[in-house]
Image (cartoon, rainbow, N blue to C red):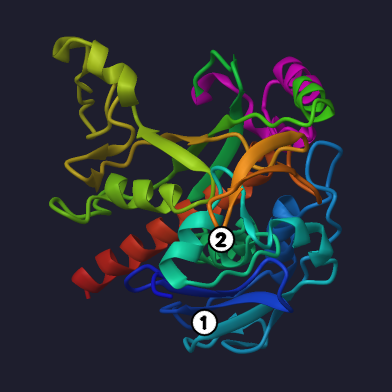
């Protein structure tokens, strides 16, 4: 299987399956001498791990990361950083009913056709559990980029949407509720709605908004390696993501150029930020902000029709432990992937000015 690595200079290669012995990864390109807060890395994993609230999957995993290389006396050595996250609460028998059948909108069918064989336990390699390794790498990237702030939050669940831009929200309130929405009243409504959806054996999608502050001018390349293109690739590589827009996004297509243009201040900053902090594929020093749309989780705890490996129509009902809405746990994943992109371009820019 190809495509297990991400990045050019700051790279992450991940391994492992949802119900295998462990997940893990190898990070290459991290400079030496970076002092790491290992507790902060673990806290990032805790934000993503299952079983953390009543509105997420109840799989109980500690998701404790263990580092095997690349760190000595609390600092990076410049060599490969290897790490592992052990799986401790697998219930593989929950998936025996899909051994010979394909769940709609999952990777089951295409994996079988592509590889001629698949790990049906929780989706194997296609499971969103793989993202735990991304969060570890993203946490290290954040500490390397200590002056740059990455903040993601839930801005929509189903049709419930925040009608305020990030500049009008108190982003310090994101972790004050289990939905990770910085508006208390909307968070309460979203939580109630997710619980209602779950009680019906159904699922619902949503949107995660991310804001990156203090990005220096000059990250990104003007042709194929545009900064927003790499951010889009990173976000679209996350399980269940169906859409990405940055800056004014699709709404910008409805505006006049005279309204959309970001007029300059004398210091090079702009009076507005419809560009989303990126112009010509290169960061301009303003806040980078973007939205990531997540589809409803495909596993339904209700009966539905599908097909088996012989093409026969069969009845199936989802079993096991699944998220009724993935967006609350996706917040740290979005931040992590954003950090990996910025770290990679930061190192590329640094090499230009050596």
Q: Is residue 101 magenta?
A: no
Q: Nearer the viewer, residue 200 or 195?
A: 200
The residue depicted at 84 percent of the width and 50 percent of the height is 51
Quadrant of the frame with the C terminus = bottom left
Q: Position of residue 121 (x, y in %)?
A: 70, 65
Judged left or right of residue 327, residue 237 is left
Q: Nearer the viewer, residue 66 or 310?
A: 310
The residue depicted at 39 percent of the width and 37 percent of the height is 244
Res 143 → quadrant: bottom right
Q: Is residue 92 above or below residue 324?
A: below
Q: Position of residue 314 (x, y in %)?
A: 66, 44
Distance between mark 2 and mark 1 Cα atoms: 35 Å
- Span shown in magenta: 166-192
Res 187 → quadrant: top right
- Residue holding disc 1: 33
Q: Is residue 149 above or below residue 204?
A: below
- Residue holding disc 2: 126
Q: Position of residue 24 (x, y in %)?
A: 62, 76
Q: Which numbered mark, 2 or 1, is in the foreground of this view? A: 2
Judged left or right of residue 151, residue 203 is right
**Can residue 279 be seen?**
yes
Query: Which secondary structure is most common in the magenta stretch?
Result: helix
């Amino acid at each position: 299987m190809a495509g297990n690595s991400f990045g050019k200079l700051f790279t992450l290669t991940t391994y492992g399956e949802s119900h295998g012995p462990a997940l893990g990864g190898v990070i290459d390109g991290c400079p030496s001498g970076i002092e790491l807060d290992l507790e902060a890395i673990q806290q990032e994993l805790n934000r993503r791990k299952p079983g953390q609230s009543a509105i997420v999957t109840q799989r109980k995993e500690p998701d404790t990361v263990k580092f095997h290389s690349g760190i000595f006396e609390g600092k990076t050595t410049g060599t490969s950083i290897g790490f592992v996250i052990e799986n401790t609460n697998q219930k593989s028998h929950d998936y025996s009913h899909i051994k010979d059948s394909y769940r709609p909108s999952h990777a089951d069918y295409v994996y079988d056709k592509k590889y001629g064989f698949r790990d049906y336990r929780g989706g194997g390699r296609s499971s969103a559990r793989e993202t735990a390794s991304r969060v570890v790498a993203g946490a290290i990237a954040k500490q390397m980029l200590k002056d740059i702030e990455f903040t993601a939050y839930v801005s929509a669940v189903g049709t419930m949407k925040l009608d305020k831009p990030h500049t009008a929200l108190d982003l310090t309130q994101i972790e004050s509720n289990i939905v990770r929405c910085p508006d208390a009243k909307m968070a309460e409504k979203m939580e109630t709605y997710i619980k209602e959806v779950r009680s019906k054996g159904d699922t619902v999608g949503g949107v995660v908004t991310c804001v990156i502050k203090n990005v220096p001018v000059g990250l990104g390349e003007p042709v194929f390696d545009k900064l927003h293109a790499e951010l889009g690739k990173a976000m679209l590589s996350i399980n269940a993501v169906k859409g990405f827009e940055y800056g004014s996004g699709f709404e910008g297509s409805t505006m006049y150029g005279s309204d959309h243009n970001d007029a300059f201040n004398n210091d090079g900053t702009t009076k507005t930020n419809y560009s989303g902090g990126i112009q010509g594929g290169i960061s301009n020093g303003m806040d980078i902000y973007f939205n990531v749309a997540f589809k409803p989780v495909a596993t339904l705890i209700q009966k539905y029709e599908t097909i088996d490996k012989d093409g026969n129509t069969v009845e199936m009902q989802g079993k096991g432990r699944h998220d009724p809405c993935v967006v609350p746990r996706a917040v740290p994943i979005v931040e992590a992937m954003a950090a990996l992109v910025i770290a990679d371009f930061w190192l590329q820019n640094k090499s230009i000015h050596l």
